[in-house]
């Protein structure tokens, strides 16, 4: 990631940034899980509870290398806009997205898909930092990490539900 980080102007991960990792096994091949993870429509369906919408959709309607998207959602009763860039796509193994404008001082979400005896091990690594220096770090520690964990878990539940739906098998 170092070479890409330099190309995209990313800062190396700082020690004052919050981080969490979620892992989930989904009963589907990595290619199917990978493709579903890049589906903007599935993302919107998974975030309906937060009234998330796409203000700016990716060109062509699907996420590809260099795609940008602007999301609008309501969290903590407050409306937010977040613009993301999708990069480092290595089908069907991994991709990343990061905030290029929005409420965070920094936000990076790495998606990894590995073969597993029961389908695909999907791993999400989220590294972020809220603004406002020490106050933001306190918010990250007390509230934001748990909130984002739940949010990504909800998204993963929706993704698994759609992929593993009734009657689906690993070869589907």
Image: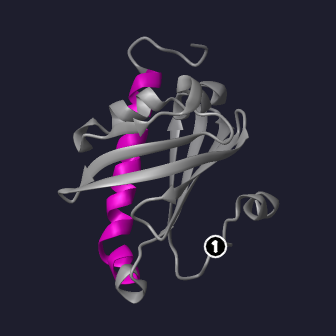
The image quarter containing residue 161 is top left
Magenta-colored span: 137-164
**Rendered residue at 35%/51% (across/down):** 151
Q: Residue 88, image x and y in percent? A: 71, 47
Q: Is residue 121 visible?
A: yes
Residue at 39%, 57% in the rendered image: 149
User: Residue 60 location, x and y as percent?
Assistant: 58, 24
- Name the residue furthest left: 77
Q: Position of residue 63 (x, y in %)?
A: 58, 33
Would residue 139 be counted in the magenta stretch? yes
Above or below residue 48? Residue 151 is below
Side of 3 where 48 appears, left or right: left
Q: Is residue 118 visible?
A: no
Q: Residue at x 31, y 55 (%)?
A: 80
148 part of magenta stretch:
yes
Height in image: 153 above or below 149? above
Circle 1 crowding by C-alpha within 10 Å: few under 14, some 14–19, many from 20: some
Which quadrant does the N terminus fall into?
bottom right
Left or right position of 42 against 122: left
Element on which disc 1 rests: loop
The front one of 124 and 56 is 56
Residue 66 location (% of width, % of height): 66, 42
Q: Quadrant of the C terminus?
A: top right
Q: Residue at x 37, y 80 (%)?
A: 136
Q: Residue furthest bottom?
A: 134
Q: Nearer the viewer, residue 20 or 39?
A: 39
- Indicate the colouring scheme: one colour
Dot 1 corresponds to which residue? 13
| Among the 4 quarters of the image, the one containing residue 134 | bottom left
Q: Is residue 37 left or right of 158 when viewed as pictured?
A: right
Q: Main secondary structure of the magenta part?
A: helix
């Amino acid at each position: 990631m170092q070479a890409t980080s330099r190309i995209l102007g990313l800062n190396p991960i700082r020690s004052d940034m919050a981080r969490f990792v979620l892992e989930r096994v989904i009963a589907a091949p990595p290619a199917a899980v990978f493709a579903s993870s890049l589906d903007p429509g599935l993302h919107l369906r998974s975030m309906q509870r937060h009234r998330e919408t796409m203000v700016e959709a990716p060109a062509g309607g699907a996420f590809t290398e260099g795609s940008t998207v602007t999301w609008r959602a309501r969290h903590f009763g407050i409306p937010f806009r977040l613009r993301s860039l999708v990069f480092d796509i290595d089908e069907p193994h991994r991709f990343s997205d990061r905030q290029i404008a929005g409420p965070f001082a920094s936000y990076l979400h790495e998606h990894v898909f590995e073969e597993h005896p029961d389908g695909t091990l999907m791993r999400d690594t989220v590294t972020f930092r809220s603004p406002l220096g020490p106050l933001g770090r306190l918010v990250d520690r007390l509230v934001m990490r748990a909130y984002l964990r739940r949010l990504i878990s909800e998204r993963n539940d929706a993704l698994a539900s759609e992929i593993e739906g009734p009657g689906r098998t690993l070869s589907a």
